[in-house]
Amino acid sequence: MKTEIQGSPSFSHVHIDLSPGERVIVEAGAMQSMSAELGMKAKSNGGFFSALGKKVFGGESFFVNHFTNESSAPQRVTIAQDVPGEVIEMQIREGQDISLQRGTYLASTDGVRIKTSWAGFVSWFSGEGLVKLRATGSGTLWFGAYGGIVTREVRGDLKVDDGHLVAYDSSLKLKLALAGGLFASMFGGEGLVTRLIGNGTVYIQTRSIKGLASWLNPKFR
């Protein structure tokens, strides 16, 4: 399998060249174009209850598409997310555990397992929902977000504004915190933020859908 991400960071799309017999699993609606020789099957996103949980709580679709190269030559499928922004390609290793916020999963190879997990009330208060997705196993994972994606290494703690957290090592703990002092947090426009505690990697989007909606809404009145 050969892959290439183009259009970064604003309009990322991923070219995936599948060798004969290879397969990639893609979020429903994410296919931009595909070789006519590729086979495509829609399957539930895990078992019935797992797929239902991912749809209701994880912001993902009930069905995902399996693209398989059934020919004797390499074939290409190109995928992209709904919103303009960056896509990250990550190699998952056995023992690694990555938490994904709702709606960020784009695609993965066979060896990556995607499951739902309780995110806690901190995630809910920060606008990300009570359930998160967790990626484990071994293989390639693609996820994306609105805007660019900044990678930060946490050594101790880091505060992230609500709506900007994309993915993070599951070993990191999430807590609610004030952005600064009480007065600054209340009148400085930041309020409560998510505090990540521990050692690990976090992925942060440079824009938020919530911020875009707040900017657009007054213009339609």
Image: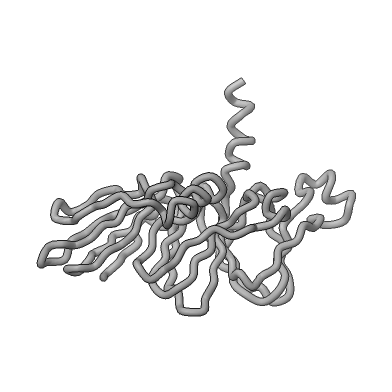
Residue at far bottom of view: 94
Q: Residue at x 17, y 68 (%)?
A: 20
Above or below 130: residue 201: below
To which quarter of the image does residue 87 belong?
A: bottom left
Task: State whether residue 17 appears in this view.
Answer: yes
Task: State whether residue 146 appears in this view.
Answer: no
Considering the image in quadrants, where does the N terminus appear? bottom left
Estimate the x, y position of residue 142 in percent, counting from the top left.
42, 62
To which quarter of the image does residue 172 belong?
A: bottom right
Residue 117 horizontal side relative to residue 125, left or right: left
Name the image colouring: one colour
Residue at far top of view: 221
Considering the image in quadrants, where does the C terminus appear? top right
Above or below 173: residue 40: above
Q: Residue at x 26, y 52 (%)?
A: 41
Estimate the x, y position of residue 107 in percent, counting from the top left.
39, 59
Q: Residue at x 57, y 43 (%)?
A: 209
Q: Viewer-proximal residue, 28 or 90? A: 28
Estimate the x, y position of residue 210 in percent, counting from the top left.
61, 42
Q: How many marks?
A: 0
Residue at far left of view: 72
Q: Residue at x 71, y 63 (%)?
A: 174
Q: Viewer-proximal residue, 8 or 199? A: 199
Residue 137 horizontal side relative to residue 98, left or right: left
Above or below 86: residue 112: below
To which quarter of the image does residue 119 belong?
A: bottom right
